Image: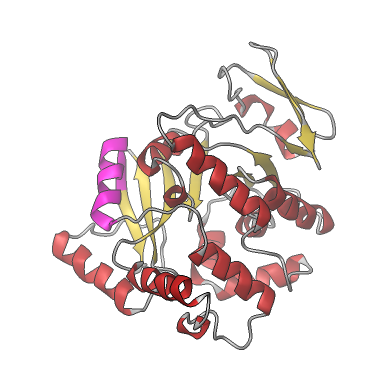
Amino acid sequence: MNLMIKHGGIFICPLCEGPLSVYGDRCQTRCSKCNQVFASENSIPLLFWPQKWEGSGADVTDAIKSFYEKTPFPNYEDLDSSYSLREKAKKGIFARLLDEQIPYGSMVLEAGCGTGQLSNFLGMTYGRSVFATDICLNSLKLGQEFKEKNKIENVAFLQMNLFKPVFKQGIFDLVICNGVLHHTANPFLGFQSISRLVKKGGYIIVGLYNAWGRIPTDIRRFIFSFSGNNFKFLDPRLRTKDVSETRKNTWFQDQYKNPHESKHTIGEVLNWFDKSGFEFVNSIPKLTSRLFEPTARGNWLDHLFLQFEILVSFGKEGGFFIMIGKKK
């Protein structure tokens, strides 16, 4: 059974928040309150609804959406089967641990899934339901194409604005939002929006650019801009010999040509957790082998050393850090 049909009662209209009915093989949707009908494309429900912003907020959303429609990230090059995706994911400690430790029967949302590689990987495991959303249709199409080609049944792709969620509150055991909020007009507001979708006792995982760890990237961005995109060997990813030119270009565009990004600190995200009713559980760096096992949140000095560690790694992962919280 189609995953959206199976869980049809969890959806709400992004316009009026009325009940949203899913029907047909192509997952068309209709609101029973305002009668708004939402089309679908490639069996992907088109549920994106713009957020009204004051000032330039709307321009940020439009610019980011346009950027990723032209440059979907990451691409599926060299991933021709579910086996190759699984092997790639297993090489990354975080994805492997996540797959091993998500409890059976969990409802999972990846808000801002990009091309959906993580969602497709998690959807390969029987006994969980994975919903993957993004604002960029071209990215979602790549994920949907891979899903259909490899008959991955436990994942559903939807076009959605995370500021206008199409799910009822308190539905998900786990919400993942990696590399997304720092490309929005208001990251904290975005965090609050998706945090409401987590059920009590459930978890949220957010990945952001670190204010310290991003310094090497900012320096390289200035050099690339000043030199006409020369000296690309300064980026560790771009001088790796076993990475194709297509993947290198995708990385370069995402890291150095993105139209909008913000940077954040560990203390700032802990403040988000506190204000939104979440307890700190774990983080990357300094990840323990048990993702959802509580660890000490540390003090400002611990955070200082941890962020310095991200900095001295020369931003090999783009100055990225991950925080895991549990809803009280």
Is 246 rendered above or below residue 186?
Answer: below
The quarter in which the N terminus is drawn is top right
User: In the depicted view, which residue is nearer to us: 292 or 256?
Assistant: 256
Q: Quadrant of residue 79?
A: bottom right
What residue lies at 61% left-to-right and 53% top-to-bottom? 68
Apparent side of residue 176 relative to residue 211 in the rendered image (left or right): right
User: In the depicted view, which residue is nearer to us: 246 or 58?
Assistant: 58
Apparent side of residue 119 relative to residue 212 in the rendered image (left or right): right
Residue 198 in sight in this render: no
Is 220 rendered above or below residue 256?
Answer: below
Q: Which residues are magenta?
A: 265-279
Apparent side of residue 55 relative to residue 74 in the rendered image (left or right): left
Q: Report the colour scheme.
A: secondary structure
Residue 303 in sight in this render: yes
* Residue 85 placement (x, y as % from top left): 69, 68
* Residue 149 placement (x, y as % from top left): 83, 57
What residue lies at 52% left-to-right and 81% top-to-bottom? 232
The quarter in which the C terminus is drawn is top left
Q: Is residue 276 magenta?
A: yes
What residue lies at 40% left-to-right and 71% top-to-bottom? 222
Is 49 rendered above or below residue 308?
Answer: above
Mainly helix, strand or loop, the magenta region? helix
User: In the depicted view, which residue is nearer to us: 98 or 180?
Assistant: 180
Q: Is residue 157 magenta?
A: no
Total numbered badges shown on the rendered structure: 0
* Residue 112 placement (x, y as % from top left): 55, 48
* Residue 143 placement (x, y as % from top left): 71, 54
What residue lies at 23% left-to-right and 59% top-to-bottom? 296
